[in-house]
Image (cartoon, rainbow, N blue to C red):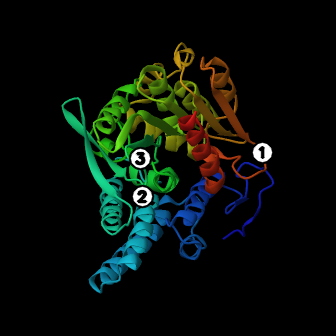
Amino acid sequence: MTATRTTTSDVLGAYEYWPEDPFWSFQFIRMVEQACVGAADFAELHMVAKDLPVGDGEAWYAGFKALAEKLEAKAATAADGGHLVSARDTWLRASNYYRSAGFFLSPADERHGEAVVARRRSFQAAGRLSPADIEPVEIPYEGTTIPGYRFGPVAGSPQPGPAAVIFGGTDAVAEEMYFFLGRALSERGFTAVAIDGPGQGEALRRGIHSRHDFEVPVGAAVDYLVARDDVDPQQVVLVGQSLGGYYAARAAAFETRLRASVIWGAVYSVHQGIAEHLAAGGPTADHFAEQFQRIVGVGSLDELMSRLEAYTLDGVAERIRMPTLIVHGEADLLSPIPAAYRLFEEISSETKDLIVYPTGQPGCTHCQVDALPLVHFDICNWLERQLRA
């Protein structure tokens, strides 16, 4: 193993576990930072990672799957013995390690689907023991349903109260969105609904592929929320992360029932972004090429690039008239900072804010995976201010 060190390239804000491979380091830091919300433990992570051959996806899968299985069994034993808090906390970490185990596998690999099932199983077991209200939901959508979770507000929160639709992007799934933001919103009195929309998580495993007009599934989630007695229909907001930043901008442009929107990592043109990754080449490009073909539901790169032409905010951004916040890392390698500046300029809302986390500082990387408390502070405080306005 190459020793960890402070980054010299500044692309990851805090450090690079594997200086020779920023993408692997990014995925590891993603888990390390989630320790602050109960989704990981550094010692457990280090025991797996210290001996991994860098770039060996099979070794990554084997190591984190074994850790997840060990913890899932440990949680079940604790629950059988009546140690419910210990069981809950252990199942939460197991769920996140199952998610990570499948990350570098081909989406066509049956083990990838098995990791999805195991992730959901562990998360839902933890949810049944949580003092917060964590409920699996199925949201009606075009003759079928899309899966997700409702994270209820903490006890004593005023009702009806604010609510949020939240989702990730290429690979952040509904269970992980609890750690990324759902818990933080719940503690602030929000009802949060995290969805696996078209092309995401469990929805993708069911064969529901991505679509450029993501306002349609967002509208379905809003339908679900405004029908609830504990939700104020005038206080429904939206947060989309990573590729979800593109999806959130689409929804903000067309779903008029939303009070405010947060674009957590701006993506102006998905087509342009993928084209640039492909031109750069390397393992990251190969990963995204295969991932996006699966997400969109096509069989070739040519077909993928043709379909992605519709995934642009050109002619859409100016339709965003609600209060909107963009948060973006200046050193974001997956979606470079110019996308955030362009989108900010084109949004028509009189209330719009852009937070850029400077290169070399916490938060400078993609979607602030290295600085969750910092981005929770900024996103949640901004949302609270909009709802009080």
State the separation of the CA atoms marked 3 and 2: 16 Å
**Is 211 above or below relative to 70?**
above
Mark whose residue sits in front, 3 or 2: 2
Would residue 301 appear left or right of 227 to someone viewing this image? right
What type is the residue that disc 1 sits on? Thr
Instruction: Check the image and name the residue furthest to the top.
Output: 315
Would residue 1 appear left or right of 316 to someone viewing this image? right
Q: Position of residue 204 (x, y in %)?
A: 32, 42
Would residue 356 appear left or right of 253 to someone viewing this image? right
**Which residue does the numbered mark 2 point to in the structure image?**
156
State the separation of the CA atoms marked 2 and 1: 40 Å
State the separation of the CA atoms marked 1 and 3: 31 Å
What type is the residue that disc 2 sits on? Gly
Q: Earlier in the sequence, mark 1 or mark 3?
A: 3
Q: Badge 3: few (under 14), some or many (20 or more) residues near its Cα, within 10 Å?
A: many
Instruction: Give SS at disc 3.
Output: strand
Q: Badge 1: few (under 14), some or many (20 or more) residues near its Cα, within 10 Å?
A: some
Instruction: Give SS at disc 2.
Output: loop
Q: Position of residue 102 (x, y in %)?
A: 42, 57
Mark whose residue sits in front, 1 or 3: 3
Instruction: Please give the name of the residue rendered at 67% of the width and 61% of the height, measured from the top-left corner.
Output: 18
**Is 288 above or below relative to 152?**
above
Q: Earlier in the sequence, mark 2 or mark 1?
A: 2
Residue 220 numbered mark, or none: none
**Which residue does the numbered mark 1 point to in the structure image?**
359
**Which residue does the numbered mark 3 point to in the structure image?**
192
Q: Earlier in the sequence, mark 3 or mark 2?
A: 2
Instruction: Give SS at disc 1.
Output: loop
